[in-house]
């Protein structure tokens, strides 16, 4: 038997976890032929087939099932060695981060800079999306770390709670926004808000139904920048993060108003799969907390 190759074992585990070569290739940042070649060479080294191949599916053979157990042990040991022995300058890894737009527009650049300072050779891939898609991407192993409206209630997921974002009501600067006029704004103008398949949209819809009227018109958007632009143009009002609204308020294009209530703050988490453990991903989640706390403290002192 030829010596075992860790890269081949990683490719093998990726195919097992993703259920096929295509998704495994994406998770490893490799091409499909490269993953196929690694599996073929692993089978040649072991002198046995690891998968039962049929159209549209791969199933482990009995020997493949045995190898999976040992390969996972190799994986955990390799991660531990990398964490405790290898210098951070020598770690050459690919980290896939999924982030909600709120975080992407606030402290995500600071996080990437901090990670690159800690791990100079780390390659960071960013995917900005709504939280429901980020959750699915994490559970499907398409991303390594999700910064989203959380936590994720799954036994396989570890969550680190992050500082939240307070919301405020905003309207174009030339609109009346005091006293009874402020309350009337929610009846007179469409409410611009987060995308339809998000928790903020659902919660705001319920609050508007209970506090204002059942027929309040809502304009959902997947872009926070678009939300602010629509408010600036006088096309509606919006409950949006104060941290992001500050430049628009200071620029005089929008103003905050008080209809007597405001939706709860947005709560986020840094979520990642606990098995298989990756010290890089765990370190990135902890760093996300540090960066988010520093950002929150800075904004609170402005």
Image (cartoon, grey):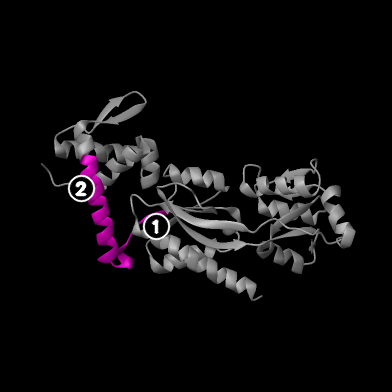
Relative to 148, say whether 119 is above or below. below
Q: Secondary structure at mark 2?
A: loop
Front one among 289 and 225: 289
Given this view, does label 1 or label 2 mark the residue nearer the observer? 1
* Residue 75 located within the stretch drawn in magenta: yes
Q: Position of residue 54 (x, y in %)?
A: 31, 24
Residue at disc 1, secondary structure: helix
Foreground of the two, 235 or 271: 271
Residue extending furthest toward the left: 1
| In the rendered image, the vertical position of residue 147 relative to residue 38, given as above or below | below
Image coords of residue 295 (percent x, y)? 57, 69
Residue occupying the far front of the picture: 210
- Which residue corresponds to the image point at 31% horizontal and 38% vertical from the top-left? 16
Residue 127 falls left or right of residue 25: right
State the CA–CA distance, disc 1 to disc 2.
Answer: 23 Å
Instruction: Let me know if residue 86 appears in the view.
Output: no
Asked if residue 161 lies left or right of residue 121, the reply is right
Q: As displayed, is residue 294 above or below residue 121?
A: below
Identify the residue at horizontal 28%, vertical 26% (top origin): 53
Question: Which quadrant of the structure image shows residue 13?
Answer: top left
| Quadrant in the picture for the C terminus | bottom right
Side (left or right) of 176 relative to 140: right
Q: Is residue 217 left or right of residue 17?
A: right
- Residue at 38% in and 65% down: 119
Q: Which residue is mark 1?
A: 281
Q: Position of residue 130 (x, y in %)?
A: 58, 47
Q: In which image quadrant can residue 277 be found?
A: bottom left
- The residue pinned by badge 2 equals 5
Question: Please, is residue 129 above or below residue 285 in the view?
Answer: above
Main secondary structure found in the magenta portion: helix
Magenta residues (range): 67-96
Mark with earlier residue (1, 2): 2
């Amino acid at each position: 038997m030829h010596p075992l190759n860790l890269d081949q074992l990683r490719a093998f585990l990726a195919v097992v976890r993703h259920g096929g070569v295509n998704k495994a290739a994406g998770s490893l940042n490799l091409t499909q032929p490269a993953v196929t070649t690694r599996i073929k060479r692993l089978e040649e080294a072991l002198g046995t087939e690891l998968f039962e191949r049929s159209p549209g599916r791969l199933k482990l053979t009995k020997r493949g099932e045995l190898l999976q157990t040992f390969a996972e042990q190799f994986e955990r040991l390799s991660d531990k060695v990398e964490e405790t022995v290898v210098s951070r300058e020598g770690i050459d890894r690919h980290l896939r981060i999924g982030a909600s737009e709120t975080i992407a527009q606030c402290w995500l650049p600071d996080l990437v800079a901090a990670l690159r300072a800690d791990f100079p050779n780390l390659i960071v891939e960013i995917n900005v999306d709504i939280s429901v898609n980020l959750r699915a991407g994490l559970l499907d192993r398409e991303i390594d770390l999700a910064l989203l409206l959380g936590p994720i209630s799954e036994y396989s997921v570890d969550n680190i709670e992050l500082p939240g974002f307070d919301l405020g009501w905003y309207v174009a600067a030339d609109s009346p926004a005091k006293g009874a006029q402020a309350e009337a704004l929610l009846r007179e103008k469409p409410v611009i808000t987060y995308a339809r398949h998000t928790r903020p949209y659902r919660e705001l819809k319920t609050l508007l139904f209970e506090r204002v009227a059942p027929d309040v018109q809502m304009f959902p958007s997947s872009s926070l920048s678009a939300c602010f632009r629509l408010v600036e143009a006088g096309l509606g009002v919006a409950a949006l993060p104060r941290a992001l609204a500050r430049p628009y308020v200071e620029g005089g294009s929008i103003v905050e108003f008080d209809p007597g209530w405001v939706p709860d703050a947005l709560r986020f988490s840094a979520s990642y799969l606990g098995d298989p453990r990756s010290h890089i991903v765990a370190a990135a989640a902890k760093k996300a907390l540090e960066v988010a706390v520093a950002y929150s403290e800075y904004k609170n002192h402005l």
